[in-house]
Image (cartoon, helix red, strand yellow):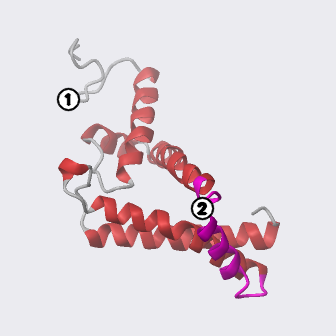
Amino acid sequence: MEYDKDDPFGYKSGKKSSSGGTDWITSFSLSALESIPELIGHTPSQATQEFRQDNPWSGVGSELLGTAVPYLGWFKAAKSIPRLTKAVESVGKLSDKPIISGALQEGMRLAPFEAGRVAVSQLPESLGGGDKSATDMATSAGLNLALGSGLGGLFHGQFGWL
């Protein structure tokens, strides 16, 4: 393989580095970092897409690690929004079943974040918006809400963690 001093990891040219484990660490890190703008509809680089395709488990792990940062930040910020906290408590009272109550609460807690994510994705790219369609982003947000609510309900109701 040729070594390009201006592009040592081969991301511009599409070539892979011959540095072995360092290349995997770099690719994993890049995948984790690029998963954050993916939340607002930006398509990851070709190198990241290839890494995820070649290393499916590492790809999923890096995406989850990268997206954990904004989601955990949102959960922390959501606690300091009085109206949202009150709405989360209120919706939890709609059911006396702990799992359903927890699912409703987590859905309410996640909804503003997901709505904001979809809204920002539709801004022009020059203002930070992504390149995904509103339908793709709304589908992604809906799946995230369903999964987040379901897991939240399970952890809240079954294990009492939330």
Q: Which residue is rendered at x = 36% and y = 71% of the image?
A: 138
Span shown in magenta = 77-97
Label 2: state its secondary structure. Answer: loop
Q: Nearer the viewer, residue 103 or 65?
A: 103
Q: Which residue is mark 1?
A: 12
How far is the residue under mark 1 from the one under mark 2?
Answer: 43 Å
At label 2, counting other C-alpha atoms closer than 10 Å, the crowd grade (few under 14, some 14-19, many 20 or more) is: few
For this view, does 22 lie left or right of residue 107? left
**Residue 151: % across, % down:** 64, 68
Residue 155 placement, left or right of 105: right
In front here: 34 or 77? 77
The earlier-in-sequence mark between 1 and 2 is 1
Residue shown at 23% from the left, 17% from the top: 1
Q: Position of residue 155 (x, y in %)?
A: 73, 66
Residue 92 is a magenta residue: yes
Whether residue 115 sits left or right of residue 45 in the image: it is: right
- Depth check, mark 1 against mark 2: the one in front is 2
Q: Tag 2: residue type? A: Ile
Q: Quadrant of the C terminus?
A: bottom right
The residue sitting at 20% across, 29% down in the picture is: 12
Residue furthest to the front in view is 82
Q: In the shown orientation, is residue 87 left or right of residue 10?
A: right
In the image, what residue occupies the spot 39% across and 32% down? Answer: 27
In the image, residue 42 sits, relative to residue 11, either above or below, namely below
The answer to whether residue 144 is above or below residue 92 is above
Check contact, mark 1 vs mark 2: CB within 8 A.
no
Mark 1 neighbour density, 10 Å: few (under 14) some (14–19) many (20 or more): few
What secondary structure is the magenta-colored segment mainly? helix
Mark 1 is on which residue type? Lys
Q: Which residue is mark 2?
A: 81
